Amino acid sequence: MPIRLQDVLKHSTLTPADPVIRAAAAIAAQTQLRWIHSSEVLDIAPLLGGGELLLTGGQALVSATDKRRIGYIWELAERGVAALAIETGTELASIPSSMVAAAEAAGLPLIELRKVVPFVGVMEAINSLLVSESAAHLQQADQASHAMAVELAHGGSLDRILAVLADATGSEVELTSTAGAPLASALPADHAEEPEPGASIEAAPDRARIIQVDVSVRGIPSARLTLHALAGADVNQARIAGNRSVDILALALLQRMPPGLKEMAGAALIRAVDSGTQNWRLQQLAPAAGIPLAAQLVAVVVRSPGSRQPRMAVEHLLERVGHHSASYADNAELLALAVLRPGKTQEDRDAILAGLQSLALPEGTVSAVGPVATGISAAQWSLTEARLTLDLAAGAEPLKAGPLRAGPGQSGVVLDADAFAVERLAFHSLDDTQRTDYVSQQLGALLVHDAQRNSALVETLRVWLDSGCNTAQAARELHLERQSMHQRLQRIFSLCGGDPRGTGRLAALHLAARLAAL
């Protein structure tokens, strides 16, 4: 029998916390739990599998911005977390109203723990009960997987194979292509009501009852399995059975719609470029992947909490813009190559940058587009420079303006390797000591002033130089009044030997200011 949230809230280990449901109470009554976790990390969502009750003491929420708190709620909801319980009192006086409103909108049960209880004791007691339930779920999932394999062996259609899974889990099941086109679907045999025409599984309000699993064929993402656990169904059983069915569905897809040579060659090409394979091998793989040997192309590197998650969206973007592309994802990075049209190289590259900014990618995702490479033999250089751009940005101080680019309303950050050309050149040409010495020689007085007075003259100089010495634009980017900006510039000029405009010192100061941010 599923263990529900309302049962856990009444458990003897948790009642001393005086729990109160603050949001999504209507959903909380039927919410099923798979596990209980405790974490003070706000970026925990990608590490969760769905169905968890998450306990937190609220320490990280105290210092977080309101926007980050709301994002935290939505990330957990979209991950399928069953509920969030926040301890209030010493660290966090009360749950912010913005979080309560977000949880209500997202359908995420939000519980306030008004007294302190040892989370370890709660987890040990409840998880011991959930372990026994999980063992039974695994056995049932294996039985469902075996039945699906039998149906496949007898030549059953995708609909018939999914019907086995639907009956075993009490779920509405749908298999779609990477482009979102429906491939097959099924309802449990005892489900009398048909879904409304055009109704989408993903539109269901209770996110905790929706399970999505990517299906790969020979390492190439080929489909997505969605299970919507219907009323009375065991959500945890559906989650485990869905994950256990992936191999059977991959075999079924391989029989009916195997990955083409182009897709397999594309994945092999990316791996070869990444590993530094000899050029003759790249020249064999590129034509098979649909990439001309002499094409102008760019590499794209996406680092995400789950690199497989944004792969479909990025692939669609690159195919739309560049018309030919290849990609490969592991657990840390998504790597891709995009071919640019002759005569429209810059236009296509700009479109890729803009497209990446517009994608709704997971929180914490950072992408970089490498410089334009001519010919497949130069693809590794573009890939290396894109990775270097990510590494340089990761080691930089937060930039108020400059090459860090984030799409409005999006969580991902998109970096343009061309905007880091100076930093990349310095990295290749100078070692750490030489870079430090150069910055000290050019900006020594400014660095001392900033250290002693907690000012930001070096950052002001960099923004001003990045703007092409446009004082008004720099003031806007730094959120300063023009008079304050002029005063800062006069202080900078007095410390670095005068106004550098019209002198050979301008480029030297600009280089030093950019390197100082690293």
Image (cartoon, rainbow, N blue to C red):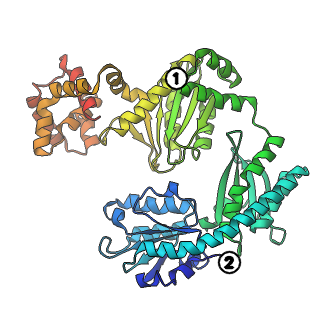
Q: Is residue 167 above or below residue 457?
A: below
* Residue found 28% across the figure and 30% down from its top: 514
* Residue highlighted by disc 1: 380
Question: SS of the residue at dot 2?
Answer: loop
- Looking at the rendered structure, the kind of residue marked 1 is Gln
Q: Quadrant of the C terminus?
A: top left
Res 375 seen here: no
Q: Amino acid at mark 2?
A: Met
**Quarter of the rendering containing residue 284:** top right
Crowd band around label 2 with a 10 angstrom C-alpha radius: few (<14), some (14–19), many (20+): few
**Residue 120 placement, left or right of 512:** right
Residue topped by disc 2: 1
Residue found at the far right of this picture: 154
Residue 91 visible in the shown view:
yes
In the displayed structure, does residue 427 sit left or right of residue 280?
left
**Label tally:** 2
Which quadrant holds residue 428?
top left
Q: Give me the residue at 47% from left, 63% from top.
A: 73
At which x and y percent is residue 21? 48, 79
Q: Percent from the top left, x then y, of residue 61?
A: 36, 64
Q: Nearer the viewer, mark 2 or mark 1?
A: 2
Name the disc covering residue 299, or none: none
Of the two numbered discs 2 and 1 on the same chain, state the one appearing first in sequence.
Answer: 2
Numbered disc 1: secondary structure: helix
Q: What is the C-alpha distance between the residues marked 2 and 1?
A: 54 Å
Left or right: 58, with 344 as reference point: left
